[in-house]
Amino acid sequence: MDIWVISDFEFCYPADKPVESIYRNLPYIAPEVINGRGYTFESYIYSIGMLMWEILSGQLPFADFNHDYELAINLIKGMRPQIVQGTPMLYKNLIIQCWDADPLKRHNINTLKDKVTEIQTLYYQNENKEQNINFNSIQSNESNKNSI
């Protein structure tokens, strides 16, 4: 049984930022929340998309930017981190959907979980195919050596 546990991003913030500061964890905060609307399930999906990008890239989102008013405005206007080149298309599209400026276009958590599971299944199927191809190639080479 797969269980996903999601932290409350409202309470995650760097120790050097005041608790009441919106800039404390800005890259993970959905644009509509920055605009003053409350947190929703959809805003958490945005945050999960940012986490997916962080895991993919191995970097913190917008690490080279000050987490200030200017970044907040850019996020509202649609600025997102650049997706790492070579990212599988299904994973890339999933991240982009999580980041959609329209919260209603983001997946719900169950759909997101299903999509991640689908990507994981495809990955393992492809990995097994590659291993079989490599194994068959080795066997073929050994057969050719023995017949010479």
Image (spheres, helix red, strand yellow):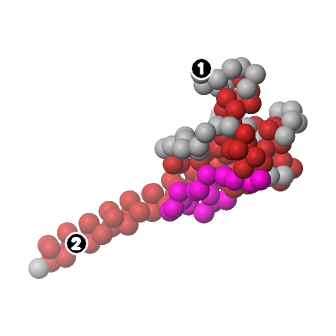
On the rendered structure, is 133 left or right of 6? left
In the depicted view, which residue is nearer to us: 103 or 138? 103
Q: Is residue 58 above or below residue 2?
A: below
Magenta part mainly helix, strand or loop? loop
Q: Are marks 2 and 1 in contact (CB under 8 Å)?
A: no
Is disc 2 surrounded by few (<14), some (14 to 19) or many (20+) residues within 10 Å? few
Given the image, on which type of amino acid does mark 1 rest?
Ala
Q: Residue at x 51, y 48 (%)?
A: 57
Q: Quadrant of residue 144?
A: bottom left
Q: Can you identify the residue that label 2 sits on?
A: 141
Image coordinates for residue 61, horizontal then vertical, percent:
59, 43
Name the image quarter holding the N terminus: top right
Q: Is residue 27 above or below residue 123?
A: above
Given the image, on which type of amino acid does mark 2 rest?
Asn
On the rendered structure, is 78 left or right of 13? right
Is disc 1 surrounded by few (<14), some (14 to 19) or many (20+) residues within 10 Å? few
On the rendered structure, is 58 left or right of 21? left
Q: Can you identify the residue that label 1 sits on?
A: 15
Measured Cα–Cα span from mark 2 to mark 1: 59 Å
Which numbered disc covers residue 6?
A: none
Q: Residue at x 69, y 53 (%)?
A: 79
State the extent of the magenta-drawn residues as a range. 77-93
Q: Is residue 83 magenta?
A: yes
Image coordinates for residue 120, horizontal then vertical, percent:
57, 50
Image coordinates for residue 73, horizontal then vertical, percent:
75, 46
Q: Can residue 107 be seen in this snapshot?
A: no
- What element does badge 1 sit on? loop
On the rendered structure, is 16 left or right of 74? left
Q: Is residue 67 above or below residue 104?
A: above
Q: Can residue 74 be seen in this snapshot?
A: yes
